[in-house]
Image: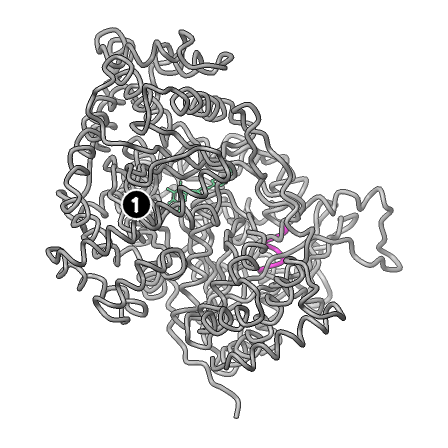
Amino acid sequence: MELTTKDFIKDYKNQFQSMYAYSYEEGSTEQLYNALGLLVKNYISTPWKETRETYIKNSVKQVFYFSMEFLPGRQLKSNAYNLGLLDTVKEGLTELGLSFDELSEAEVDPALGNGGLGRLASCFMDSLASLSMAGNGNGIRYQYGLFRQKFVDGYQVELPENWLRYRNVWETSNDKSTCMVRFGGNVWLERNKQGYLEAKYENTLNVLAVPYDTPMVGYRNDKVNNLRLWSAEIPVEEENNYHTIEETEPIKEITQVLYPDDSNYEGRLLRLKQEYFMVSAGVQSIIRHFRKYNVPRKNIPDKVAIHINDTHPALVVPELMRILIDEERLSWEQAWEITFKTCSYTNHTILREALEKWPIDMMKELLPRIYMIIEEINRRFVENTLPLYGERITWQTAILQNGVVNMAHMAVIGSHSVNGVAQLHTDILMNDVLKDFFELYPERFNNKTNGITQRRWVHLANPGLTQLLDDKIGEDWKKNPSELKVFKGQEKDKQTLKQLAAIKLENKKRLADHIEKVKGIKVNPNAIFDVQIKRLHAYKRQHLNLLHILHRYLEIKQNPSVDYAPRVFIFGAKAAPSYLYAKQIIKVINSLAELVNNDPDVGDKLKVVFFENYGVSLAEKIIPAADVSEQISLASMEASGTSNMKLMANGALTLATLDGANIEIRDFVGGDNIFVFGLTSPEVYELKAAQTYNARDLYENNSNIHRALNALKDGTIPNLQDEGHAIFESLVHFNDEYFVLKDFDSYVQAQEDIDSLYKDQNEWTRKSLLNIASSAPFSADYTIKKYADDIWKVKSCAVEHEG
Ligand code: 26Y
């Protein structure tokens, strides 16, 4: 949009004064930020309204992305940028003697998700809007986000994240769109006068769902979509339906906290309440929209696509059936046809412990009508499948099994499309995790490799690189990422390489300052910045990284002149509060950091930095400064990974197993420009099947492994209780579930190859350039186009302006 600096200044002064009744000169940083945020939101309001009206007027097909998690990151800068106002705003503030960066740091980063799945949802929101597609988010407005992580004596401590304590300038509570969600009580069917079977309820607990809408601003296209997050509130009492304070107490709990478990499912009643609450409110508001505009119900699949982000919102299937049958009076067959055509499902994990299975008794009691419908879906499924495929397949794929509701099965049966998030992952779904379903419904399965938005992760996070790209290849890549490949043409250009290296060094200096500020550790910006940032989980193998650092440390102690390139190992990771082993790994890394960072024999050769409270904002600081991207999960375990893509796009070289999207990264950048190590996925499957793996043998016969493992428990690492022992035990006595020791040697070798290459700065930077130039296929814009074409059948839509 067009705005002069002068107008901005005027608007800003007015905005501030109207909010606080004094001049901006007296404002606190918080207030200055609030005024700026609300002003930017004012600028957004017109295209937001026009976008909505255009969708309605043209009756375009809309996507609703149902997700229990969203991790949007701070929004001031990205909104101003996407609107095309960032420079104007910065200039105006400078004229007023204010710093944009300082104000923008005052924004809280909403941590409404755990990790990859939540951040992916937000990258998708950004791409949908930027591609002018009607795509809305539907989720939960948790009062407390993911815990704030603090280290006390090296141990993770979780603090509440009360992100709404200050005002959230981006959201608009939308009182006219509330709906009621019913829990519990008794339900029965009664034939009414017209002959319909009517669902009758008594003694239900009714919860008011209040939507909070947040604008999702497209990149310079006047397009603004909607992220709708629901909050549970106590309904205003009615004459015949009222509840005491005691009875309504549990209502407030429903949207109070985000479950901090990533890939570790526990069948907790409150989580099931959250899932149904979000699903029911979302589906009700969609159907209400169709009623308002008189859309024939059978046309619903032409007008809406509902996406189920992992199984967490899979209750969409029975909920949509419920509304179509009980409220819209459609027959089962009609309702099923609509539901099935409307819904699609993405799987994000093959970890058994992450697959949701709800006890039938719990479901029956909390959601009696929904359970009746699930039972009927299951009955019909069995009835149809049994004669065609026989007992084994039918019972293996049923929704109801051994007293539980299998949510993945419900999602597959109720959706016309099922996808994995990288080619290897999709192959594993088809050949292993969901292989019986692949036999039943091969046509439903497809792959959609994840992607990231370059706007947040390159344009905004790495302005130096962005400027260089603009200078060297023009600005087209910003709208059309495939243009990035033109940058390959510069791989031999000495000057470009020099500039690229200088930009990386600048970014590293900035991060080094930040490290010193928050951790008190001095690091050398000329060292290799080696980064592993992701949730802490045994399958991601932060402990393999740890063992290698320990190995290097012991080598240095043994031979202080050993020729290692200086290296800073950087970690960012939260562990689920109940995941003891992950927390033990954090503690050992922190204690090792203390040892290494303070040992005069080590000097610059080795530094270890474990950031507290890793999240989107910290990632934006770390990623542009990274030289090495650690993607070292056991092959077959990481569905895709997305930090691998962000790091690559910022010129880090990937050190990886052939897992998830790493395989595709290698294919695009070429085997010479990535460091690959370790078992492949087929080898992992083979080794598991053969049951011949013996970790103790490796411990006993491999001297490096032996030495490093002993150092975990012999007092080498200071300040440990039993954490070093615990890791030792898991690897040696419990036979190393994730083959850490098996991959150790080849990992160490790859790390040495990294050292050698880094000594040739020119060659290193050339490979870095090739990584940047090959990163376009991982743009979320492409991923979203594929979802739109293959699954959702939605198109871009031009927004019409008034006047
Ligand atoms: C059921 C509950 C405990 C649960 C909660 C969160 C289960 C799983 C999750 C989160 C999963 C997740 O974030 N998965 C990640 O999704 C990314 C986006 O597709 C992938 O890149 C990444 O490999 C995968 O681990």
Which is more toward the observer, 217 or 21? 21
Considering every residue shown, the one lying at the far bottom of the view is 803
Q: Determine the residue positioned at 76% across, 48% down.
A: 205
Give the answer, above or below, for where 609 lies relative to 282: above
Give the answer, above or below, for where 204 lies relative to 286: above
| Residue 195 x %, y % | 67, 64
Q: Secondary structure at mark 1?
A: helix
Residue type indicated by callout 1: Thr
Considering every residue shown, the one lying at the far left of the view is 492
Residue at numbered disc 1 = 426
Note whether residue 656 is visible.
yes
Quarter holding residue 463: bottom left
Asked whether 281 falls inside the magenta stretch, the response is: yes
Give the answer, above or below, for where 513 lies relative to 72: above
Left or right: residue 116 compared with residue 312: left
Mark 1 Cα shell of 10 Å, populated few (<14), some (14-19), many (≥20): many
